[in-house]
Amino acid sequence: MASPPQLPLADDLFLTAHDTVRGKCLLSPATLGLGLSAALLAELVLWRRLDVVDSKIVIIDDRPTGDPATTAVLDQLLREGSHRVVRDWISFLATGVAVDLVERRLSRGGHVTRQEKRSLIGGTKVYFVPADSMTAGWPATRVRTCVSRGELLDVSDLVLSGLILATGLDQQAFVTLDARGRPALFDQLRRRMPAMLQELVAHAEAAVGDAVMARRA
């Protein structure tokens, strides 16, 4: 049986952050938003549209990517002119922009279906239910399999792994990695992930930490 296709980075993170059958989110809304914000910015780095230098975003190519989600983020960056602090953009996109863009992209691709369920206390809860549980579980499975086999992750999966760790999703996604698997993964992240993407993941991790502390205060 052929493996499911590899989706864009933020889509992979979204699927990893949700139950593969019911679509229930495993993260708080704030943490999900921060993770997806960093993932979309990382996609633009992979598209070679921007760099991250000294905690700031530097646009190196303003052409549309051909993808509505990343093009929307790039357009917003261009409209804001010189205000390009990475942490500020992660926080801004996490206000709902990133989640909405990724949900729309996954829906257009037929990978999730929007469903509404009424709660017993009133109101409606929206879920994005995976169209196929194998596809939904594939991002985490792909990373675990590669690491367990001693294979090298591609750059997108290195960033995905970094963001899984930054958001705390590793407690579900990497729980079956053995005692050798985690050190091997950390070694790949340290040695092979490009510096600008390491910096982006670090900013996401710091933002998640601040959000957790704010909830506890």
Image (cartoon, rainbow, N blue to C red):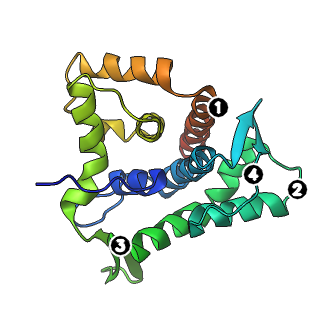
Instruction: Please state which of the two labelled residues, at mark 2 or mark 4, is closer to the viewer.
Output: 4
Within-10-Å neighbours for mark 1: few <14, some 14–19, many 20+: some
Q: Amino acid at mark 2?
A: Gly
| Horizontal relation, residue 208 to residue 76: left or right | left
Residue at 68 percent of width and 64 percent of height: 64
Could you tell me if the residues under marks 1 and 2 are in contact, i.e. CB atoms within 8 Å? no
Give the mark nearer the N terminus: 4 vs 1.
4
**Is 109 placed above or below 10 here?**
below
Could you tell me if the residues under marks 2 and 4 are in contact, i.e. CB atoms within 8 Å? no
Give the mark nearer the N terminus: 2 vs 3.
2
Instruction: Please state which of the two labelled residues, at mark 2 or mark 3, is closer to the viewer.
Output: 2
Instruction: Please state which of the two labelled residues, at mark 4 or mark 1, is closer to the viewer.
Output: 4
Give the mark nearer the N terminus: 4 vs 3.
4
Instruction: Please state which of the two labelled residues, at mark 4 or mark 3, is closer to the viewer.
Output: 4
Task: Measure the alpha-carbon separation of dots 3 and 1.
Answer: 34 Å
To which residue does mark 3 refer? 127
Within-10-Å neighbours for mark 3: few <14, some 14–19, many 20+: some
| Horizontal relation, residue 3 to residue 79: left or right | left
Give the mark nearer the N terminus: 1 vs 2.
2
The circle on residue 61 is 4
Instruction: Please state which of the two labelled residues, at mark 3 or mark 1, is closer to the viewer.
Output: 1
Judge by depth and name the residue closer to the eye, 17 or 39.
39
Task: Find the residue positioned furthest to the right.
Answer: 82
Residue 74, percent across and down?
71, 59
Residue 110, percent across and down?
34, 75
To which residue does mark 1 refer? 196
Q: Amino acid at mark 4?
A: Asp
Q: Amino acid at mark 1?
A: Met
Could you tell me if the residues under marks 2 and 3 are in contact, i.e. CB atoms within 8 Å? no
Give the mark nearer the N terminus: 3 vs 1.
3
